[in-house]
Image (cartoon, rainbow, N blue to C red):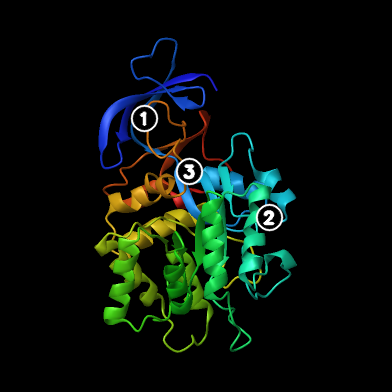
Amino acid sequence: MGKYNVVHVNIFDGWKFKNDHVIVNGDKIGENKDAAGCEPINGNGGFLIPGLIDSHVHVSCKEELETMRDYGITTALDMECWPLEKLNSLRGQDGLPTIRSAGLAAQYQRLGEWPPESKVETPQDAHMFVAQRASEGVDYIKIISDPPPFPPGARGIDEASMAELVNCAKIHGMKTIAHATEGIGFTLALKTGVDIITHAPLVPGLDGGQAEQNAIEHMLATKRVAVPTLVMMKGTAESFNPPPPGMKYENAAESVANMHKIGVPILAGTDCNVEDNAPCQPKHGSDLHTELKMLVDDAGLSNVAALRAATVLPPQYFDLPDRGVLEKGYRADMVLLAGDPTKDISNTRKIERIWIGGQMFKPSKHWSETDK
């Protein structure tokens, strides 16, 4: 990996850019005064940001990790990957994004060929589910809090079982993440103390108005976090022709805007996947940049807030204390951009170089000129 001095560059300090230089010493950011023996890397006046973090992915192969790297993603937070052997084969790949994962997600009833140990019908099942995931070395617990879309009237995980999932996860020192695309799942996640809620309701399920405001205020008061995956929500809404009554993407975007206005932390995630049974398949890598643009244009985040949603904030809420900022001692995950993303968030696509754990890369075969 060597020792680099990245010069003639503007460095993101979490809120703004300042002209400076960065020492990369092995896989860590070094002391700025220690430039002796460093190979100079000319940043050409570019803009250096912490490595991008996608807070909701589904990874199935090494090629997807390579694609994400080429789009500046240095950490990917996977929300379901099984069997365990597949997950472990994707972890720790040299020069590729760090993977954190829930392994298998907890559910009551779901379509597809999921293994029986994913099903949670009782609090005792919940206890056993979390213990098994902990023994497998997963990083957090994912829960499907929505009932399945069909057959009509199908039920989801009940409140007692979901509360036990949350409590057991806390005992094992793990966060909980709830899949909630409907009001019923969103409300259940709030009631049972889930830490992070992913997706945003496409159909108003909180009766709108004061009920929704109360729920969002509760999120803030109890320090919950949202990963809205707007690119997935829009794709899902557009996959129905005609859509179910009341379903529209604007509901999800408005919900995220209201969360942001009151101060609920918003993290950037895509739900990228290649699953045939998913309502849509956001693209690995490129659609994180789409998500950032949607957070700005559709949900009212500032360019800085959107950038923080994919850099500074995810490590704070996913227990990744070694990354997310460009300071001495932190992991050398960085992205050099040709344009200032605090002026135009689309500039996150103008990637010149990527560093993962101190290893330097240039965008390769997965990157096209149309992305710049």
Mark 3: secondary structure: loop
Query: Which x, y percent locates residue 334?
Result: 44, 35
Query: Which x, y percent locates residue 197?
Result: 45, 64
Q: Residue, x 37% and y 37% (percent of image)?
A: 325
Q: Residue, x 41% and y 80% (percent of image)?
A: 248
Mark 1 vs 3: CB contact within 8 A? no
Q: Nearer the viewer, residue 102 or 335?
A: 102
* Kind of residue at badge 3: Gly
Q: Considering only vertical position in the picture, is 172 above or below 338?
A: below
* Kind of residue at badge 1: Glu
Task: Count the labels in the image.
Answer: 3
- Report crowding for label 2: few under 14, some 14 to 19, many 20 or more residues within 10 A (C-alpha): some
Eye-nearest disc, 1 or 3: 1
- Report crowding for label 1: few under 14, some 14 to 19, many 20 or more residues within 10 A (C-alpha): some
* Kind of residue at badge 2: Gln
Eye-nearest disc, 1 or 2: 2
The disc label shown at residue 327, or none: 1
Q: Which residue is mark 3?
A: 72
- Report crowding for label 3: few under 14, some 14 to 19, many 20 or more residues within 10 A (C-alpha): many
Q: CA distance from mark 1 to mark 3?
A: 19 Å
Q: Would residue 271 be visible to someone looking at this image?
A: no
Judged left or right of residue 310, residue 218 is left
Q: CA distance from mark 2 to mark 3?
A: 33 Å
Q: Nearer the viewer, residue 44 or 328?
A: 328
Sequence-wise, the earlier of marks 1 and 3 is 3
The disc label shown at residue 132, or none: 2
Sequence-wise, the earlier of marks 1 and 2 is 2
Quadrant, the N terminus? top right
Q: Nearer the viewer, residue 315 or 96?
A: 315
